[in-house]
């Protein structure tokens, strides 16, 4: 039987299955429960913003400090003068009970030799020494962070900067690892395992005895968070019907944005890093009470030939939704797989037990020239989406003011982009939403380069336009990837795409630093990539309104015009139906 006729039969099966699995009470309960845990992913991804917060600090003076000068400011303690540090150049000057006068800077301190009085300016000799006595931190914004607890400043500053890259490395590893494992062991097992790990590892991070244990636990936590986020997109996609698949997939991103806002709120209320981390880990702990009741998806069960389990699940869904479910799992099979009348079910079970299962790897994403081109384009969308998002955020948007409010707004601003993205995806299609969004982001980058530097309002408007467009493309690529690949390798496709996304997020800070070479070089790089990849996106097949595919052959047939032979076979199946 040809690939097209097989695809036709699967479409008939998917249409019948949608009578049962289109969003109703059963699917709504599963969806909101699964998406609720995605909030934890947003929390852990952004938690380091306040965990590694570095406040103002100076070297500690030896002995008891009695007086402090900072230009025209006088104080009794070093801590009282720290909030003003940075508003003007120069060190703090401290006098100790022993009469010594010390000039305190961030990474060094100098002892004044034979001062005649206590004044801020001093032209005499000084004895410069290292900060052997520790540091004094400004606790006005952050009472305690890992930086203040473990003195991750000066020559140890690189350790603090290493926290987020190591976390993102864990995200990269987790995306690839759990995407592959979910295709082999099932979606539910991975959802349960990563959920327990997110809670357990998140709480363990709060009790880290030192920096190295902290980084290791955060690396493992990143793997779990990334694994859950990858698999939950596949899970909700396979458990919702065609009519609502766009909205259910895109709103997983909304849950992630809620996690970002939660970080801002908890960070504002709790200024002690270990308590802050513990509270964040407890936010989604109720999910653990019912995640063990999650069923496997019907698409996965059918792909793994577990027909009895699939039939039991369909019956449960129909019963919970108050429907008379007359759909049988055997009706979703090819005619030759159904067996004869009367004993057909046993024949299917015997054949499923005897049929060897092929081990699929990431190389299967490149099984043909058509699939290889599709995979390269999808990976490029993942990469430029992440790269562009962080370049726009880090390089062009600097709100200033209250850092907690800024982070809250950064999470809230994502919500309208997903709303507009959902509407466009259902109206004009996935390809016709993603392609123009990338092109718009590229055009915005190029316009930033040609706009006069003193036109601040125009530059900010263009930067926000680019970020908004990138967010739309980045939001829909999860669902688009799910629909472009078959069930047997879907989690691996999403996982590998997420890996490219993490590569983009790691590269983004280095791209931002290229502004030191030329101020517009980051925008030029993102603009060129977005324009090129935006054009390549139009070569991908459209998946709006199409059923999910099961085999690699069916996925490869997407976007391909049917031949006359396939059309004849399709008509024959229609007559038989």
Image (cartoon, helix red, strand yellow):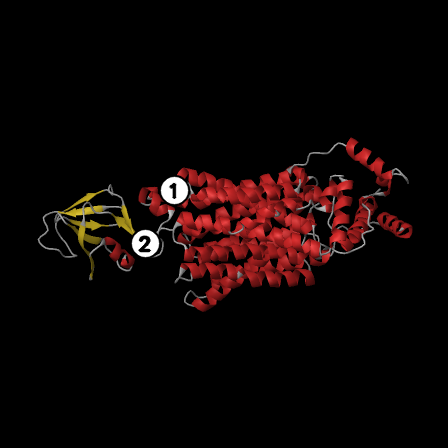
Q: Is residue 446 left or right of residue 366?
A: left
Q: Position of residue 139 (x, y in %)?
A: 32, 54
Q: Can you tell which mark lies on residue 139? A: 2
Circle 1: element type: helix
In-front residue for pair 200/458: 200
Residue at position x 56%, y 41% in the image: 174
In-front residue for pair 425/228: 228
Q: Is residue 523 visible?
A: no
Residue at position x 57%, y 62% in the image: 417
Q: Is residue 164 left or right of residue 32?
A: left
Circle 2: element type: loop
Q: Position of residue 540 (x, y in %)?
A: 68, 52
Q: Position of residue 564 (x, y in %)?
A: 86, 50
On the image, numbered disc 1 is attached to which residue?
159
Q: Is residue 549 above or below residue 445?
A: above
Q: Position of residue 266 (x, y in %)?
A: 45, 55
**Mark 2–mark 1 distance (CA, rounded to whole Å):** 21 Å
Q: Can you tell which mark lies on residue 17? A: none
Q: Is residue 94 left or right of residue 453?
A: left
Instruction: Count numbered badges in the picture.
Output: 2
Q: Residue 252: which quarter of the image?
A: bottom right
In-front residue for pair 153/294: 294
Would you call the spot at circle 2 few (<14 residues within 10 Å), some (14-19), or many (20 or more)?
some
Numbered disc in front, either 2 or 1: 2
Q: Earlier in the sequence, mark 2 or mark 1?
A: 2
């Amino acid at each position: 039987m040809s690939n097209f006729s097989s695809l036709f039969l699967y479409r008939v099966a998917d249409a019948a299955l949608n009578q049962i699995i289109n969003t109703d009470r059963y699917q709504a309960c599963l969806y909101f429960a699964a998406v609720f845990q995605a909030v934890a992913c947003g929390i852990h991804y952004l938690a380091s913003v306040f965990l590694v917060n570095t406040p103002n600090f100076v070297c500690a003076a030896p002995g008891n400090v009695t007086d402090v000068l900072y230009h025209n400011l006088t104080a009794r303690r070093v801590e009282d003068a720290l909030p003003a540090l940075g508003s003007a150049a120069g060190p703090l000057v401290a006098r100790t009970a022993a009469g010594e006068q010390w000039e305190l800077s961030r990474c060094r301190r100098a002892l004044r030799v034979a001062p005649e009085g206590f004044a801020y300016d001093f032209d005499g000799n000084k004895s410069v020494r290292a900060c052997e006595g520790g540091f004094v931190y400004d606790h006005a914004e952050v009472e305690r962070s890992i930086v203040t607890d473990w003195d991750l400043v000066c020559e140890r500053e690189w350790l603090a900067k290493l926290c987020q890259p190591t976390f993102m490395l864990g995200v990269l590893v987790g995306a690839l690892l759990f995407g592959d494992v979910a295709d082999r062991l099932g979606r539910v097992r991975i959802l349960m395992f990563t959920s327990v790990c997110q809670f357990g590892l998140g709480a363990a991070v709060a009790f880290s005895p030192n920096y190295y244990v902290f980084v290791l636990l955060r690396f493992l936590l990143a793997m779990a968070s990334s694994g859950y986020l990858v698999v939950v997109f596949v899970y909700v996609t396979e458990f919702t019907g065609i009519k609502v698949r766009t909205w259910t997939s895109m709103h997983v991103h909304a849950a992630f944005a809620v996690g970002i806002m939660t970080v801002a709120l908890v960070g504002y209320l709790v200024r002690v890093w270990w308590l802050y981390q513990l509270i964040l880990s407890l936010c989604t702990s109720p999910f653990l009470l019912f995640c063990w009741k999650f069923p496997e998806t019907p698409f996965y069960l059918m792909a793994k030939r577990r027909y009895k389990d699939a039939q039991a699940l369909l019956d449960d869904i129909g019963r919970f939704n108050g429907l008379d479910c007359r759909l049988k799992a055997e009706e979703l099979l090819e005619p030759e797989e159904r067996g004869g009348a009367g004993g057909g079910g046993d024949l299917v079970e015997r054949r499923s037990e005897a049929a060897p299962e092929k081990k699929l790897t990431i190389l299967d994403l490149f099984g043909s020239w058509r699939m290889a081109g599709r995979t390269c384009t999808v990976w490029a969308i993942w990469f430029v989406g992440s790269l562009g998002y962080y370049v726009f955020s880090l390089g062009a948007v600097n709100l200033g003011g209250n850092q907690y409010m800024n982070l809250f707004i950064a999470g809230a601003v994502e919500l309208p982009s997903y709303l507009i993205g959902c509407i466009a995806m259902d109206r004009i299609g996935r390809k016709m939403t993603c392609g123009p969004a990338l092109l718009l982001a590229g055009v915005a980058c190029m316009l930033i380069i040609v706009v006069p530097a003193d036109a601040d309002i125009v530059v900010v408007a263009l930067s926000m336009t680019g970020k908004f467009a990138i967010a739309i493309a980045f939001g829909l690529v999860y669902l688009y990837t799910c629909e472009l690949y078959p069930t047997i390798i879907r989690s691996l496709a999403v996982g590998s795409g997420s890996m490219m996304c993490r590569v983009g997020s790691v590269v983004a800070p280095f791209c931002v630093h290229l502004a030191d070479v030329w101020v517009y070089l980051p925008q030029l790089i993102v603009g060129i990539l977005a324009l090129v990849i935006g054009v390549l996106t139009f070569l991908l097949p459209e998946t709006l309104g199409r059923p999910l595919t099961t085999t690699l052959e069916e996925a490869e047939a997407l976007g391909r015009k049917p031949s006359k032979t396939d059309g004849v076979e399709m008509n024959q199946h229609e007559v038989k139906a």
